[in-house]
Image (cartoon, rainbow, N blue to C red):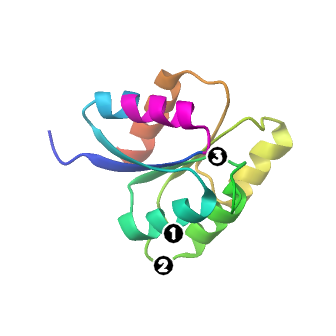
Amino acid sequence: MGEKRKILIIEDEEDLTLLLKFNLENTGKYAVSIAYDGEDGLRKAKQESPHLVILDLRLPKLTGEEVCREIRRDEKIGRVPIIMVTGKSSPADRIIGKVIGANSYIPKPFKIEQLIVEIDNLTNPV
């Protein structure tokens, strides 16, 4: 197997974040880094150039929307796939997620298998 794909999780729910990290790394395909607030997440995204970002909308310091917009404006990381994982699940929220640049929008609660399939689809284009 080739090099592991780098995933950055920007999520302030520590239990969920650690569960995601464990499950993703357990596949053997992904190396995961974590940020618990928007400012740290944006800084890590710029430093680490991940292959994919999992992003919550409701974050301390910078919102997920602000982080998403800043990533999309950045020349170096602007094309990285972003999956929004959030408790906000109305049709309007989904539209906002797409408009600001999310590639995918998965409402909480979700099945980890669903997320892994989406990550595989976005990081291993056919």
- Where 66 sits versus 31, above or below? below
Magenta-drawn segment: 12-22
Q: Identify the residue under disc 1.
A: 78
Is 20 part of what is drawn in magenta?
A: yes
Q: Which mark is residue 75?
A: 2
Mark 2 vs mark 3: in front: 3
Horizontally, residue 77 falls left or right of residue 70, namely left
Lateral position of residue 60 relative to residue 79, left or right: right
Q: Residues within 10 Å of mark 3 (few under 14, many from 20)?
A: many
Residue sitting at x 30%, y 28%:
26
Residue 102, image x and y in percent? 62, 53
- Is 27 positioned to the left or the right of 89 in the image? left
Compared with 67, 107 (above or below) is above
Cα separation, mark 2 vs mark 3, equals 22 Å
**Residue type at the position of mark 2:** Glu
Q: Tell me if I can see residue 95 in this picture.
A: yes
Q: CA distance from mark 1 to mark 3?
A: 18 Å
Local SS, label 3: loop
